[in-house]
Image: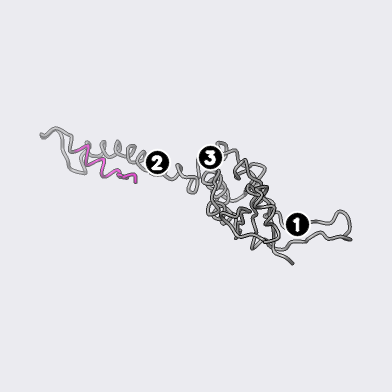
């Protein structure tokens, strides 16, 4: 934490460094004290700016350097739309910085939570997860070992396209889930394939 000294503290330091004698008065009303008081304002201002720089070093609290954080992190990107509020822009920067890649279910569950989603992750690997018995032959043969499924629990309203529906109907209602899928595909281990499922209507 940055120690912030005000002008009075710097004035006291300057007066403490003065030589002794009648030519160097310490009284607050003296011309020398007034001169030193004016000189103390600048280091006090720099101290305050240093404290602000500590906030700018974290994208969650950055304000002046927020455009620089976005530039360095490449925001907005195809998975992150341009945000309009400061808080949303700060959250987008922090999310991209903190959740660049991971390999555990806990990592992806936490990342989904930052986007406002509750999810469950199922791995089609008999060593780490339960799976549908009908898939036993495929899974034990190893063909699904690098496939994992994200089940979105609070995906909102979705329309499922069924046989006989008119062509051109919207498949998914709500773009937020599409952002979630884009973010996950960008962060998943390169050798894996992720599929998504949503609550039944």
Q: Which is more N-terminal, label 1 or label 2? A: 2
Query: SS of the residue at dot 3?
Result: helix
Distance from the alpha carbon under mark 2 to that under mark 1: 48 Å
Crowding near the residue tagged with mark 1, few <14, some 14–19, many ≥20 C-alpha atoms within 10 Å: some
Quadrant into which the C terminus falls: bottom right
Label 1 element class = loop
179, 43: nearer the viewer: 179
**Region rendered in magenta:** 1-15
Residue 154 point in image, percent of width and height: 64, 63
For this view, does 63 lie left or right of residue 11?
right
In the image, residue 118 lies at what x, y percent? 60, 60
Q: Which residue is mark 1?
A: 172
Residue 164 position in % (x across, y down):
89, 61
Comparing labels 1 and 3, the label whose residue is closer to the camera? 1
The one nearer the camera, 165 or 16, is 165
- Dot 3 corresponds to which residue? 69
Rate crowding at label 2 as few (under 14), some (14 to 19) or many (20 or more) other CA atoms within 10 Å. Answer: few
32 vs 160, nearest the viewer = 160
What is the spatial separation of the Cα atoms under label 3 and label 2, in whole angstroms? 19 Å
Sequence order check: which comes first, mark 1 or mark 3?
A: 3
Query: In the figure, residue 42 lies in which quadrant?
Result: top left
State the residue position of label 2: 49
Residue 162: assigned label: none
């Amino acid at each position: 934490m940055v120690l912030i000294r005000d002008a009075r503290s710097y004035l006291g330091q300057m007066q403490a460094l003065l030589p002794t004698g009648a030519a160097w008065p310490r009284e607050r009303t003296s011309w020398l004290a007034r001169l030193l008081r004016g000189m103390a304002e600048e280091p006090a201002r720099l101290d305050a700016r240093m404290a602000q720089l500590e906030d700018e070093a974290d994208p969650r609290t950055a304000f002046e350097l927020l455009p620089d954080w976005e530039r360095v992190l490449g925001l907005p990107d195809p998975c992150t739309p341009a945000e309009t509020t400061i808080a949303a822009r700060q959250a987008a920067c922090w999310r991209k910085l903190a959740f660049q890649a991971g390999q555990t279910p806990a990592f992806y569950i936490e990342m989904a939570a930052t986007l406002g989603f509750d999810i469950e992750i199922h791995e089609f690997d008999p060593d780490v997860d339960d799976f549908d018995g009908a898939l036993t032959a495929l899974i034990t043969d190893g063909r699904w070992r690098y496939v994992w499924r994200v089940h979105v629990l609070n995906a909102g309203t979705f329309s499922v396209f069924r046989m006989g529906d008119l062509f051109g109907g919207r498949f998914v209602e709500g773009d937020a889930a599409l952002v979630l899928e884009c973010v996950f595909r960008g962060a998943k281990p390169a050798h894996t394939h992720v599929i998504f499922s949503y609550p039944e209507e």
